[in-house]
């Protein structure tokens, strides 16, 4: 059976990442990049779709797991009747080809161990040719090759490579799996122990740059490390998640490929990086965005590939049965072709944050922003697919209009506060026009709340962003009415749903978990509203649903009490970081007592 998401941990090298289960099995890995074809796809099917098991011969689960302090190195401790072993999993920051390193360490007594390596390229569809080499095997099919090097003698059983061996106290047994293009020479062997030392030092040196994580230091730093792990180092792009098609509802069809970079995440991600003192990563993210969106504003997409590629054609992989039978399994994302008005505001807000925080000034960025504003001037009145990328008809989404307001508001501030040249009076008039229209058509007097679409009665948790982006102050009666309406209609067992999928037509069957980012926005609203104790309680509730390694998926099912959606999710961890910092600033150090 597929493991619950809570039982997975993440290792990565800032170019790709693997999910390691508490049972010692790596069930997901794309090589050589996040968006490459997977060679281990068991999480979306069965072990026959590719995995790498390394665990006690009798099976079972780790009695304890942890990351080595301030690193992305997982230690899993397995206890058996005869002894205890620790499996260390990591991916060294890359200087050449990607490596996955696993070291078995004998702690007490002796333990019979087993490894089963099932390599399946192209998302479980291709069985490679496998040949033995000295101290291991190599496997090849099409453009892909991997080599496994280990002192343990391995052999083939069926279409897998296996070995049984015993580890005694004090012994250390390494395994190194390396990907390389099949048309190139076998890469040089790396030393597993030296690589472990280097990787630990690399992550700790990076973590030391964190500027004041506050009372929730452990939780915040773990989220920041996760965001760093989801960064594609060569370009600075940050993927939404390292996975595809992990369902938002078990057995449902809301299964999407998140191995791309969303413009919508830009502002929140930048804020979290800058607040923590990671200016280099923030600057790289801004520069990735400017390269990706270069061109005509009418061709702006909501997402791009790691390198800025635009064509993200959506395809269903029908041979994969899906996570817990949740189909279809998709690669690519058709939402890339949608018109989502809010991203224009988010891009402008991100550039505003760069100016406000003193990042290196870019005249190219300002010229591009002016082109966006010219386009937005003629398009902001049009309906769109909205922040939630609905696959139903376009509508006048209130949150989209609010973000259009943000775009013109930040442009006015660029002129008035930062000395840029531009028609501030015209932008100010557009800003005021949008604000008036949103308050007239996006606010339902009967509900005393802002609503999802103009002149509707549907609620939407994205409207919690209104005070966060400065559209209205938190104390405004309309904001408070919206907060109360969301508490009444969109909260389930203490968590916030995006909207009611059972009553709202979004082009998909009903059912999903509570969106964790919305719950973090709710905590922010509570703090802004002076409800300090409730804000703390909400934040601590969100911290409590992290897994034992501190990781969060996109959503949480408050009924089944399990994480759902792609995992781990950058937007959830961005929300955690931002809310922790917001609470620290709003409540002050004396009042702010958060668990970590």
Image (cartoon, rainbow, N blue to C red):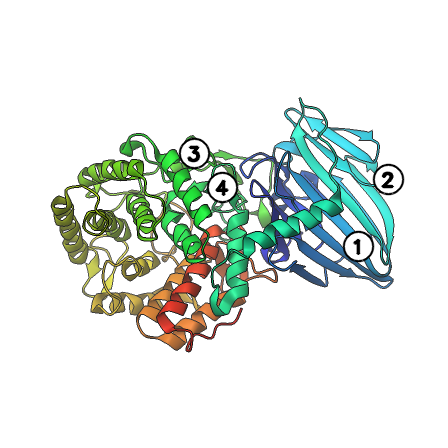
Quarter of the image holding residue 69? bottom right
Residue 290 x, y percent position in the rendering: 36, 37
Upstream in sequence: badge 2 or badge 4:
2
- Name the residue that disc number 1 marks: 105
Q: Secondary structure at mark 1?
A: strand
Give the mark nearer the N terminus: 4 vs 3. Answer: 4
Residue position marked by numbered label 4 in the rendering:
257
**Mark 2 Cα within 10 Å, few/some/many (few <14, many 20+)?**
some
- Residue at the (37%, 75%) spot, across then down: 532
Q: Badges 1 and 2: C-beta atoms under 8 Å apart?
A: no
Q: Position of residue 96 (x, y in %)?
A: 63, 34
Asked if residue 315 can be seen in this view, the reply is: yes
Above or below residue 16? Residue 274 is below
Residue at the disc numbered 3: 308
Q: Nearer the viewer, mark 2 or mark 4?
A: 2
Q: Quadrant of residue 317?
A: top right
Q: CA distance from mark 1 to mark 2?
A: 17 Å
């Amino acid at each position: 059976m597929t493991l619950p998401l809570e039982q997975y941990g993440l290792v990565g090298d800032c170019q790709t990442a693997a999910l390691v289960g508490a049972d010692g099995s790596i069930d997901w890995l794309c090589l050589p990049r996040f968006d490459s074809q997977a060679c281990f796809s068991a999480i979306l099917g069965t072990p026959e779709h590719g995995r790498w098991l390394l665990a006690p011969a009798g099976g079972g689960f780790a009695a304890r797991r942890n990351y080595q302090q301030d690193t992305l190195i997982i230690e899993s401790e397995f206890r058996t009747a005869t002894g205890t072993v620790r499996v260390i999993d990591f991916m060294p920051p890359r200087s050449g080809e990607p490596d996955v390193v696993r070291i078995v360490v004998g702690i007490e007594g002796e333990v019979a161990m087993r490894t089963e390596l099932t390599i399946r390229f192209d998302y479980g569809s291709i069985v490679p040719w496998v040949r033995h080499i000295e101290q291991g095997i190599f496997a090849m099919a099409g453009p892909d090759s991997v080599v496994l090097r280990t002192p343990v003698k391995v052999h083939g059983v069926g279409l897998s490579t296996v070995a049984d061996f015993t580890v005694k106290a004090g012994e250390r047994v390494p395994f190194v799996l390396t990907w390389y293009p099949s048309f190139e020479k076998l890469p040089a062997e790396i030393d597993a122990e030296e690589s472990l030392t280097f990787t630990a030092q690399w992550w700790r040196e990076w973590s030391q740059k964190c500027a004041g994580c506050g009372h929730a230091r452990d939780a915040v730093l773990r989220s920041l490390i996760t965001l760093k792990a989801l960064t594609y180092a060569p370009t600075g792009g940050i993927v939404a998640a390292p996975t595809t098609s992990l369902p938002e509802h078990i057995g449902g069809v809301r299964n999407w490929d998140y191995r791309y970079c969303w413009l919508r995440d830009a502002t929140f991600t930048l804020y979290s990086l800058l607040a923590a003192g990671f200016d280099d990563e923030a600057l790289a993210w801004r520069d990735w965005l400017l390269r990706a969106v270069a061109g005509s504003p009418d061709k702006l997409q909501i997402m791009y590939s790691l390198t800025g590629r635009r064509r993200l054609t959506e395809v269903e992989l029908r041979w994969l049965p899906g996570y817990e039978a949740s189909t279809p399994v998709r690669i690519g994302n058709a939402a890339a072709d949608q018109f989502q008005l809010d991203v224009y505001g988010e891009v402008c807000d991100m550039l505003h944050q760069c100016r406000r925080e003193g990042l290196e000034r870019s005249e190219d960025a300002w010229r591009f922003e002016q082109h966006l504003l010219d386009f937005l001037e003629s398009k902001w009145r049009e309906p769109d697919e909205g922040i939630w990328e609905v696959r139903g008809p376009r509508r006048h989404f209130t949150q989209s209009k609010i973000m259009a307001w943000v775009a013109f508001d930040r442009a006015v501030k660029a002129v008035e506060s930062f000395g840029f040249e531009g028609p501030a009076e015209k932008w100010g008039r557009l800003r005021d026009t949008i604000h008036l229209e949103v308050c007239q058509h996006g606010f339902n007097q009967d509900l005393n709340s802002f609503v999802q679409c103009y002149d509707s009665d549907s609620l939407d948790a994205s409207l919690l962003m209104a005070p966060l982006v400065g559209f209205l102050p938190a104390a405004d009666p309309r904001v408070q009415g919206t907060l109360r309406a969301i508490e009444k209609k969109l909260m389930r067992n203490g968590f916030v749903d995006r909207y009611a999928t059972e009553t709202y037509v979004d082009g998909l069957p009903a059912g999903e978990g509570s969106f964790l980012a919305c719950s973090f926005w709710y905590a922010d609203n509570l703090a802004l509203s002076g409800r300090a104790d409730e804000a703390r309680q909400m934040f601590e509730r969100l911290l409590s649903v992290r897994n034992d390694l501190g990781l969060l998926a996109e959503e949480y099912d408050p009924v089944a009490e399990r994480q759902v959606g792609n995992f781990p999710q950058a937007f959830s961890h961005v929300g955690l970081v931002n809310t922790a910092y917001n609470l620290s600033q709003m409540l002050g150090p004396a009042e702010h007592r958060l668990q970590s």
